[in-house]
Image: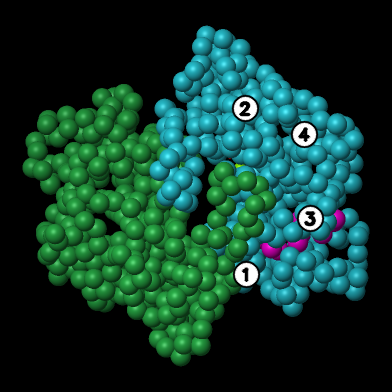
């Protein structure tokens, strides 16, 4: 089976006044039809640039400099970013949900207008049926009094409700893939639970693939079956969640898991083990592994060789590390 | 609510903080935001009391009342046995020396051109604790204590990373050698890998200096990790207080249960077996809170009583308090 979306060796660079930022430097990932995957990593590691590049939404000084984005086998990076094919992909076939819905909702248009527009363009619906479908969508995502609220403006909704509207919008044209970039980072935890439960329920019922981009390890542990861990513009580890949480094989993943407190852990039973040092400056990247300065497992080879490529360490489990840390834990 | 008096450092009773809602040209008062609406708790010496709840529930306002940055609408705040709500503004200095504060971004309110060293030295100057060479030595000592190189004292805030900035914030908070420190979302702005550094630092300092913490945060996993006891807030009120372990093992308030179940645990094995409670609706506005128990419109087990009366925080034994008629 061909993955519904497959990103191959993606490279996106920003040419800033301070220097060249290799924000995404050879990233590959895929998602199968109806599958839910997670892209995790701390802020600045290149998660958003990866998914924005996938949709060709990178603005200057950024440039997509290499790689392929195969949607159902077709490389969509060859399409003109402003052309017709690309706009039928965006929203119609691959939809995005962002952290702050206010940036993707137009503040001067009613929710009705914003929802029906996509339906009229992508599904060729007339005004009347588009409006009815929009109301149904709002009901589906749990917006109370949908018939009335559909004529409200985005600012009249709470943060959680706006995110529901975004979910409705993303689902509206039955896309094959939804990319949710930190969809719940700006909301409280009980709202996060409401929204994620809703999203996962909807994509499962519609057999839509979902990519959850997040820095929250708990969110991936709860909802995702396969994970990609990013660090400094690259994927450093990927594999089934069960595997990665049980047997992390990249020192950065080990570090992340060791540094977060876990709800329910008896008090005083585990001291947090922080990752020493700081994330690298993407403008001055070493030729070696970018995690090297913070790594507790480093060996001589790490100083001598360029950044290690991903190698297989288990079933569908890959790590970009020379060291076999499996038995050292 | 009573703990043994001799070991109690802070005792807050029925604290209320209402902010007036003003409208129109004449700025007429048309109502109140009941940010804190009858909160009681105590903190024992050398313990950490965690204060959790979702944004807008009043956590920061509680902290600011204890710091006397706000004059509370009602209630008492006893620090070391003295009700600090009654102390006139001009006589607060000795209290302020005893209570330190750490915020999410320690520099948001400071002059961006002030050096880190001078930021840390401020409290020492204000309280006349050191001057001249003595002051420099004390600042260097504070830098080392929080894991910073004293040679960085000449730099300005933007030259530091988020984690380093928070270390400077901690050094400043501890400069006057307070016994009590209010930490308000001290790690919320930091990346995951850096959060652990700051949590560990706070724990080490508590141990070394015998500090008492009021640790305010929305991240329940972090609060549970660092706190001896936890108070859960919902819409201006405390709904439950108990020890960290008990809160997880035996939550009694329906809101606490929902809150706990909403926090995903970074372990897929654990997640597969957990029950998920998904709350309906949203938190009402503190300007128009529901009558009775503030949680009743979203509560699965609420009855008539809950819509009419405010459930008191009652002792169910073993230092476990819950504000629910049905629990
Ligand atoms: N418009 C831009 N101009 C310059 N650099 C950028 C721009 N957008 C992103 N970057 C850089 O690319 C890197 C990756 O950013 P991003 O993908 O947003 O990270 P994440 O989503 O993982 O937090 C960051 O170091 C950031 O500074
Ligand atoms: N100075 C103020 N004036 C008016 N309303 C305020 C003020 N400070 C806080 N509030 C309101 O009080 C409520 C509680 O706020 P806060 O204590 O900051 O909550 P938390 O720290 O739990 O997020 C919120 O509804 C907030 O908007
Ligand atoms: Mg991002
Ligand atoms: Mg706050």
Position of the C terminus of chain B by quadrant? top right
Label 1 chain ID:
B
- Residues marked 1 and 3, same chain: yes
Q: Position of residue A73 (x, y in %)?
A: 12, 64
Crowding at label 3, few (<14), some or many (≥20) Cα neighbours within 10 Å? few
Which residue appears farthest toward the front when viewing the image?
A327
Q: Are marks 2 and 4 in contact (CB under 8 Å)?
A: no
Q: Position of residue A253 (x, y in %)?
A: 46, 65
Chain drawn cyan in the picture? B
In this rendering, the answer to whether A8 lies above or below A1 is below
Q: Are marks 4 and 3 in contact (CB under 8 Å)?
A: no
- Hue used for the chain lettered A: green
Q: Position of residue B303 (x, y in %)?
A: 51, 12
Alpha carbon distance from label 3 to label 2: 29 Å
Q: Would the CB of label 2 be found within 8 Å of ligand 2? A: no
Label for residue B239? 2
- Residues marked 4 and 3, same chain: yes
Q: Secondary structure at mark 1?
A: loop
Position of the N terminus of chain B by quadrant? top right
Q: Earlier in the sequence, mark 1 or mark 3?
A: 1
Residue drawn at 57 percent across, 43 percent down: A264
Alpha carbon distance from label 4 to label 1: 36 Å
Q: Secondary structure at mark 4?
A: strand
Q: Are marks 1 and 3 in contact (CB under 8 Å)?
A: no
- Residues marked 3 and 2, same chain: yes
Residue drawn at 30 percent across, 34 percent down: A141
Residue drawn at 32 percent across, 30 percent down: A142
Query: Where are the magenta residues, as a range?
Result: B166-177
Q: Earlier in the sequence, mark 2 or mark 4?
A: 4
The nearer-to-camera label among 2 and 1 is: 2
**What residue is disc 1 on?**
B160
Label 4 chain ID:
B
């Amino acid at each position: 089976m061909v993955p519904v979306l497959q990103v191959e060796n993606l490279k996106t660079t920003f040419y800033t006044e301070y220097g060249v930022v290799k924000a995404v430097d050879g990233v590959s990932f895929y998602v199968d039809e109806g599958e839910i995957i997670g892209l995790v990593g701390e802020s600045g590691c290149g998660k958003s640039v990866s998914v924005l590049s996938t949709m060709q939404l990178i603005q200057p000084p950024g440039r997509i400099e290499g790689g392929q984005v195969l949607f159902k086998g077709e490389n969509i990076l060859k399409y003109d970013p402003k052309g017709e094919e690309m706009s039928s992909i965006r929203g119609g076939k691959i939809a995005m949900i962002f952290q702050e819905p206010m940036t993707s909702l137009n503040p001067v248009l009613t929710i009705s207008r914003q929802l029906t527009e996509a339906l009229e363009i992508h599904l060729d619906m007339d005004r009347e049926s588009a409006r009815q479908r929009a109301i149904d969508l709002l009901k589906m995502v749990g917006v109370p009094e949908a018939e009335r609220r559909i004529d409200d403006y985005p600012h009249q909704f709470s943060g959680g409700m706006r995110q529901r509207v975004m979910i409705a919008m993303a689902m509206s044209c039955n896309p094959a893939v939804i990319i949710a970039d930190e969809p719940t980072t700006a909301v409280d935890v009980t709202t996060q639970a409401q929204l994620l439960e809703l999203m996962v329920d909807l994509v499962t019922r519609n057999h839509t693939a979902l990519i959850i981009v997040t820095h929250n390890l708990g969110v991936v542990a709860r909802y995702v079956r396969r994970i990609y861990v990013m660090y400094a513009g690259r994927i450093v580890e990927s594999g089934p969640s069960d595997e990665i949480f049980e047997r992390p094989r990249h020192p950065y993943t080990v570090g992340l898991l060791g540094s977060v407190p876990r709800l329910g852990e008896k008090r005083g039973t585990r001291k947090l083990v922080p990752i020493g040092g700081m994330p690298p400056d993407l403008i001055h990247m070493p030729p070696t592994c970018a995690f090297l300065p913070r790594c507790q497992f480093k060996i001589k080879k790490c100083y001598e060789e360029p950044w290690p490529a991903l190698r297989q360490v288990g079933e569908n489990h890959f790590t970009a590390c020379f060291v076999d840390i499996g038995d050292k834990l | 609510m009573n703990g043994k008096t001799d070991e109690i450092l802070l005792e807050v009773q029925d604290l209320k903080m209402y902010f007036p809602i003003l409208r129109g040209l004449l700025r007429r008062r048309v109502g109140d935001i009941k940010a804190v609406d009858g909160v009681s708790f105590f903190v024992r010496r050398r313990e950490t009391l965690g204060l959790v709840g979702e944004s807008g529930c009043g956590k920061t306002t509680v902290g600011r009342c204890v710091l006397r940055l706000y004059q509370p609408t009602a209630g008492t705040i006893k620090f070391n046995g003295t009700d600090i709500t009654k102390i006139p503004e001009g006589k607060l200095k000795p209290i302020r020396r005893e209570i330190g504060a750490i915020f999410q971004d320690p520099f948001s309110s400071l002059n961006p051109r002030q050096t880190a060293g001078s930021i840390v030295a401020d409290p020492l100057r204000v309280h006349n604790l050191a001057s001249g060479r003595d002051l420099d030595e004390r600042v260097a000592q504070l830098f080392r204590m929080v894991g910073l190189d004293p040679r960085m004292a000449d730099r300005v805030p933007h030259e530091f990373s988020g984690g380093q900035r928070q270390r400077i914030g901690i050094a400043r908070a501890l400069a006057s050698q307070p016994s009590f420190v209010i930490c308000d979302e001290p790690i919320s702005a930091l990346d995951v890998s850096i959060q652990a550094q700051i949590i560990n630092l706070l724990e080490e300092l508590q141990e070394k200096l015998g500090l008492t913490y009021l640790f305010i945060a929305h991240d329940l996993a972090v609060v549970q990790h660092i706190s001896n006891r936890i108070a859960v807030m919902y819409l201006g009120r405390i709904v439950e207080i108990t020890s960290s372990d008990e809160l997880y093992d035996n939550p009694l308030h329906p809101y606490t249960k929902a809150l706990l179940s909403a926090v995903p645990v970074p372990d897929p094995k654990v997640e597969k077996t957990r029950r998920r409670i998904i709350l309906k609706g949203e938190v009402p506005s503190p300007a128009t809170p529901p009558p009775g128990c503030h949680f009743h419109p979203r509560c699965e087990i609420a009855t008539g009583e809950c819509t009419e009366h405010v459930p008191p925080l009652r002792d169910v034994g073993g230092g476990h308090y819950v504000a629910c008629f049905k629990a």
